[in-house]
Image: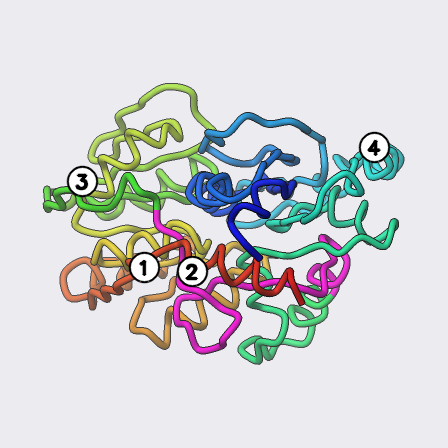
Amino acid sequence: MSVHHLFFMKILYCVQLTGNGHVTRANELIPEFKKVAKVDVLTSGNQNSLDIREKVSFKYRGISFVFGTNGGVDIFKTIINFRLFSFLKDTLTVPVKDYDLIINDFEPVSAWACKLRGVKCFSLSRQFALRNNKHITNKKTKFLQNLILRYFAPSEHGIGFDYNKDISNNFYPIIKSELKNVKINEENHFTVYLPSYSINNITNFFLNIDDVKWHVFSPKISSSIQKKNIQFFPTDYKIFEKSILSCKGIICNAGFETTSEALYLGKKLMVVPMKNQFEQYYNSNILSKMGVKILTDLKTKRIESVKKWIFSGKTVKMNYDYNYNSIIQKILSDFKK
């Protein structure tokens, strides 16, 4: 397919806004797609701290996973907030047949619009890499995983992203351009990002480790707060970026985005998998095999594990630099089949 021909191609790029990884991929990849085609953007969801830089043509409520206060997704609130009839109505309004290619980063409205109308939907997401994984052995978790992967944003075609590129249809993580070719130093603080824990839970845990400084970022506050050796910040990404570039280590949930950035920057990493979030069980399993320390929760008995990690924990560094155009070419190649 010639470049000249591609410029007449129309792409609808659809992004799920729960978590920052989907937004990061969109911000880095959409400009690449625009070099060869006309691109419109569709979004749904609202649990993120990053802004999508591209103009959004279609915006829907979609389905958002609601973070709780004790380390997990609040399943009850997630279900209560879901508007089934509004969702079905939205699927009927997405003009999927007006486009040559639908690219979907785990976005449910457009995925179901395609499924209901028999339109091919091409998945470009972290979740697509999990479809055939064998790293989750817990039966309950595996059932939930298969249910979500099959029905949340259904797609039979696509490519995935993983920490290690061990499958031909997987690529390394997408890293923000802002974190590349920048000065990385080490000051006397550790950065914490655990959005599914309350301020009280975080405070009660980290005040017990008072020989280091903590930078804690949380969506549950709107302004900075100082509590002894803990500095709390709202989830402003510019401040967060500055903190992780200069920190001694990072403690975060096992989400794909922040953990990939920590590995790329060569920062000491400890992860606390979010409860009721199957992807994070998988991520923590892989990260553990890579040498990253896993913490199951913020109970008092875990304090000694954190102290040991601070002074002797292993640092894992990965090189995730590559030309993102290879992703574009892979998708367009598969699209022609």
SS of the residue at dot 2? helix
User: Where residue 90 sits in the image (x, y, percent)?
Assistant: 82, 34
Residue at the disc numbered 4: 93
Residue at the disc numbered 3: 213
SS of the residue at dot 3? strand
Disc on the earlier residue, 2 or 3: 3
Q: Is residue 155 magenta?
A: yes
Disc on the earlier residue, 1 or 4: 4
Of badges 3 and 4, nearer the viewer stands: 4
- CA separation, marks 2 and 4? 32 Å
**Residue span colored magenta:** 147-175
Q: Find out whether the residues at labels 2 and 1 contact each other: C-beta distance under 8 Å.
A: yes
Q: Residue 171's quadrant in the figure? A: bottom left
Residue at the disc numbered 2: 326
Residue 100, placed above or below residue 125: above
Q: Quadrant of the N terminus?
A: bottom right
